[in-house]
Amino acid sequence: MSRVISNQYSESVSWRDYLELTKPRVVMLLMLTAIVGMFMATPGMVPLDVLILGSLGMAFAMGAAAAVNHVVDQRIDSIMARTENRPIAKGKISSYRAIAFAAILSIASMFILSFFINTLTAFLTLFGIVGYAFIYTMYLKRATPQNIVIGGLAGAIPPLLGWTAVTNSVDPHSLLLVLIVFVWTPPHFWALAIHRRDDYAKAGIPMLPVTHGIEYTKTSVLHYTVLLALTTLLPYLTGMSGLIYLAAALILNGIFLYYAVKLKFAPSNGIAMKTFGYSIVYLMCLFIALLVDHYFLITLIS
Ligand code: HEM
Ligand SMILES: CC(C)=CCC/C(C)=C/CC/C(C)=C/COP(=O)(O)OP(=O)(O)O
């Protein structure tokens, strides 16, 4: 019996479980926005050490924050169908080991960013960790249906981190990129939350569809999608980006608006999850468009 108890966390644990703690697919999209932030900060090539070490430092921080989220949320994760198989909720990894893992990643991140990049980037990254792992996960998520709007700031910060890694200063254009991800977050998450409403209700988490209902949430998705479409025009209107970006943004926004309108006024089976899935494709393509446009503009000028 004692052998079973002492081995309950280590029997079938593999590196894949630790990787899962870091939410790798979310981190990949976050890192795309950070790396695009780096490239947008300079007309030339991002110095290779900044690109490699900066990315490593930021990705470690994001993974650490995600691991803390798994520790804090283990009770609710084990209640919800979507998250019940997560490594801590399933009892594959102990909280103690997950915290040690997160601490190692955070320390490595802070070391890399402060010694090889700059203290401004290290400080802002620390703000990202605290914002997501502590302010959002421990407090906001359980406190208010506006949790993801306010907490979304932590997830929106990576383009600024990428930018400051290159310039060591806060450029207003970098804040424009933060604003885009910030406004994108509510339709991204609420589309999924509509589909998973009952899960959140069961876990006692006050997500918008639980507190205000599905119809109200669909209207909110539509409002934020319109706001997002307007916000994404700003890079063109401020002269940061050119016509390639504008064309891509118009097409991507048209499709997002189509989904949001359909979700509200002509819902079909699975439309909420299709909207959620599209939100990810949208952000990925929008940031790639920023990058392609940036180097096209520079080639035109030189
Ligand atoms: C407070 C802000 C956010 C909330 C509450 C949120 C919530 C979620 C949730 C609940 C999922 C589903 C995960 C699953 O299926 O297990 C998800 C998936 C995802 N999110 Fe977010 N998200 C936020 C911000 C972001 C940001 C800023 C990004 C990237 C820029 C992002 C990228 C993704 C990606 C790529 C997935 C798909 C992951 C997969 O396929 O496993 N999210 N998000
Ligand atoms: C340094 C830095 C910028 C760190 C923060 C980056 C980070 C990991 C953002 C993640 C955003 C996210 C997936 C929120 C969902 O949490 P949730 O608890 O609502 O979703 P869940 O139920 O799937 O766990």
Image (tube, helix red, strand yellow):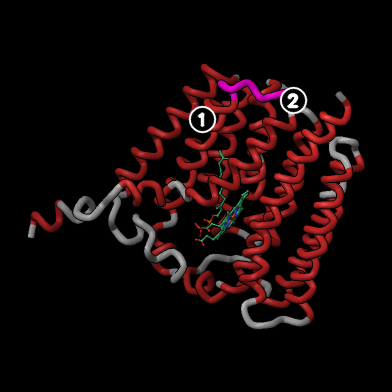
Classify 10 Å Cα crowding around label 2: few (below 14), some (14-19), many (20 and above): some
Residue extending furthest top? Answer: 115
Disc 2 residue type (three-letter): Thr
Residue sitting at 23 percent across and 53 percent down? 9
Magenta segment's dominant SS is loop
Q: Are marks 1 and 2 in contact (CB under 8 Å)?
A: no
In the depicted view, which residue is nearer to us: 289 or 158?
289
Looking at the picture, how far across and down is residue 197, in whole percent? Answer: 57, 73
**Where is mark 1, residue-wise?**
57
Number of numbered discs present? Answer: 2
Q: Secondary structure at mark 1?
A: helix
Is 21 rendered above or below residue 295?
Answer: below
Q: Quadrant of the N terminus?
A: bottom left
Q: Is residue 49 magenta?
A: yes
**Left or right: 238 in relation to 54:** right
**Left or right: 226 in relation to 49:** right
Residue stretch rendered in magenta on the structure: 43-50
Residue sitting at 76 percent across and 76 percent down? 262
Q: CA distance from mark 1 to mark 2?
A: 20 Å
Looking at the picture, how far across and down is residue 152, in whole percent? Answer: 65, 50
Disc 1 residue type (three-letter): Gly
Residue sitting at 39 percent across and 58 percent down? 74
> Which mark, residue 42?
2
